[in-house]
Image (cartoon, helix red, strand yellow):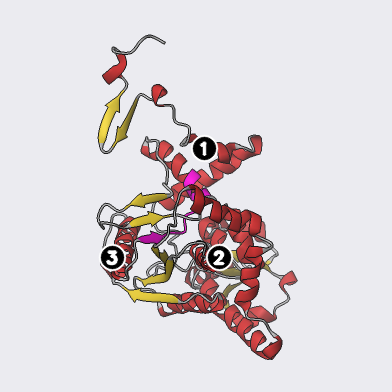
Amino acid sequence: MNTLEITQQEYDALDKKQYKVLDIRDEMSYSYGHLPDGINVPKEQLLQNWEAYTGEKLILYCKKGESSLEAAEELREHGMEVYSLQGGYMAWLMYDMEQTKIREQEAGEEAREPYLDIEMSLRKKFRKTIWCRFTKAVREYELVKEGDKIAVCISGGKDSMLMAKLFQELKRHNKYPFEVVFMVMDPGYSPQNRMLIEKNARRLNIPITVFESDIFDSVFHVDKNPCYLCARMRRGHLYSKAKELGCNKIALGHHYDDVIETILMGMLYGAQVQTMMPKLHSTNFEGMELIRPMYLIREEDIKKWRDYNHLHFLQCACKFTDTCTTCGGENASKRMEVKHLISQMKETNPYVESNIFKSVENVNVNTVIAYKKDGVRHHFLDTYDGEEEA
């Protein structure tokens, strides 16, 4: 190869044993999905430690192929043999899905619909780790009740797509009548991102209802924390559309790891003890609730389900940036720090994750200096003199 970029077809035909494939996106993006041979080395780290790869044949990729092209050009100046994957991870996703479709068509009538095996994996292989934890959360927190009409909100990522399949399975059992709508909001996705979400929905046999908004355009010129504003606006649009469709609840795909990370982030960065609740009444949309039925499911098991079924999803579909890690802006790096912290503590205490989760279920108010309830602050001195000594 004489050019700086290689196409998806050229990459597909390569003997990967001769090359080291480096994913130069941030760690969070990599964790949400990557090329099968990709090794995560963030761009800044790679350029600072390029000598460690002297003598290696490198193929770099990022989200769209722009950042990796810049990095490849810089490494070429050091005399290294390095190439950038044209179109990046996004283009690879589209190419891989197209190749999968061709293989399925060639298999003809003998091939089973992909969603059948995906559904079977939830009933068999992932029954204990995913399905049973989903139904436990639904029962324990009373998330689904007779007569509910639930808007299952799909962002296009692994969590919300799995949640949609779990709700389909729950409907199949149908112990009591309830309805679901699989809702996708397009806040201004690029054509490729929109196409990827729709293709995955078809592959998973999820009948999505898509509606559009102009949120991305609205926050594009916001300098201070546009991702936070984007997330808030999205939540409002979801509630509004769900109510328009006759729903009384929206379901979001937050999982167990989101919960424990939120608890620690509140303590370490917000100086408060709080958690991500399994359900909430909306303060702005009367009669509406938010539920989180993935509350007890571990992220690692979601990844295993994704990889077992050879599924590929985007993490952030924002069309304005290749470096956006997750909706929440600055909170993304903080969340990654907390992930690492929990991982380090787990090396010496295997129960640390469950202890963090249970800590907000075992609050002893008698040992709390102050707390808030319904916006009112209570202090232990308010009643201290009227109590007997311990």
Rendering quarter of residue 325 = bottom left
The disc placed on residue 173 is 2
Which numbered disc flags the more N-terminal residue, 2 or 3?
2
Q: At 28% across and 58% down in the image, what residue appears?
A: 223
- Neighbor class of circle 1 (other Cα within 10 Å; few <14, some 14-19, many 20+) is few
- Splitting the image into 4 quarters, where does residue 300 fall? bottom right
Percent position of residue 353, x then y? 57, 41
Looking at the image, is mark 2 or mark 3 nearer the viewer? 2
Amino acid type assigned to the residue bearing label 1 in the image? Lys
- The answer to whether 181 is drawn above or below residue 369 in the figure is below
Residue 46 vs residue 312, the one in the foreground: 312
Give the label, 1 or 2, closer to the camera: 2
Mark number displayed over residue 240 = 3
Q: Which residues are magenta?
A: 249-260
Residue nearer the viewer, 191 or 206: 206
The reply, left or right, for residue 129 in relation to residue 240 is right
Q: Nearer the viewer, residue 15 or 318?
A: 318
Residue 142 position, x and y percent, is: 45, 51
Look at the numbered discs 2 and 3 and tell me whether their residues touch, using CB distance below 8 Å. no
Give the class, few, some or many, for how many residues have Cα within 10 Å of label 3's Cα (few <14, many ≥20).
some
Q: Total of numbered circles in the picture? A: 3
Q: Is residue 254 shown in magenta? A: yes
Q: Which mark is residue 358?
A: 1
Query: Which image quarter is the C terminus in?
Result: top left
Work out whether residue 120 can be spotted: yes
Q: Amino acid at mark 2?
A: His
